[in-house]
Structure formats: C-alpha cells, structure tokens
Image (cartoon, helix red, strand yellow):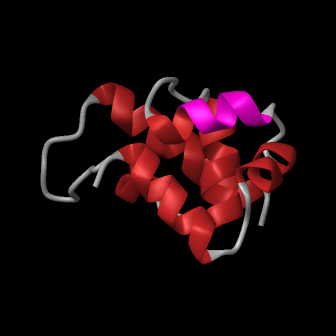
Amino acid sequence: MVFGDKIRCAREDMDLSQRDMATLIPMNQSNYSKIERGVQEPSMAQLRSICKILKLDPRYLLDIDEYEAISAEDMKLLRDIKEFIKTHT
C-alpha cells in the first residue's frame, strides 16, 4: 500500500472526511486531497500532524523496515517526529 492510501484508510477508519483532516492539520482540503492521491508530498509539519491525528507510526507511512538500512535523511525525519510526539503528548 502506498503512502496516500495508508493515510486515506486510517482517516476513513476514524470516520474523518478530507475536510476534517485539512482543518485539523491545518491546510486547505484541495492540497490534502493531493497528498492522499500522491500528487503532492506533505511538508514535515504536515506529516507530523497527520501522524499525530491518525495515530500512525511514521515508519509505517514511510515504509521503513526496522531491519533495513535507514538513510541519514530518514533518521533525521524519525528523530524530528519522535521529538514532536514527545513534546506534544
């Protein structure tokens, strides 16, 4: 399953509309829809919000297997997300 599909399924499981998600992130609904369709990538702040709102592990969204080599960029992303979650929970 690709990134946008994972987000869409989690959103639907929580009975949230795209408009609900866009409001919570915050961003406009049109751009949120583009993220789910794979047309646009979320910013770091948007990714953090999506993970927090949908209670998703960013490793799941990014298809990072705990046993595969993780790039320095991915490690920084994971550290940023971990710090964000720690300070906002």
Residue 17 on image: x %, y %: 73, 59
Part of the protein shown in magenta: 29-34
Q: Residue at x 57, y 40 (%)?
A: 80
Rendering quarter of residue 29: top right
Most foreground residue, 44 or 77: 44
Report the residue that reaches farthest toward the left. 68
Quarter of the image with the N terminus is bottom left
Q: Position of residue 38 (x, y in %)?
A: 43, 32
- Judged left or right of residue 77, residue 84 is right
Q: How many marks?
A: 0
Residue 9 coordinates in the image, percent (x, y): 49, 65
Q: Is residue 25 left or right of residue 84?
A: right
Nearer to the camera, 17 or 69: 17
Q: Is residue 6 above or below residue 69?
A: below
- Magenta span includes 59: no
In the image, residue 64 lies at what x, y percent?
27, 50
- Residue at x-position 71% and y-position 61%: 53
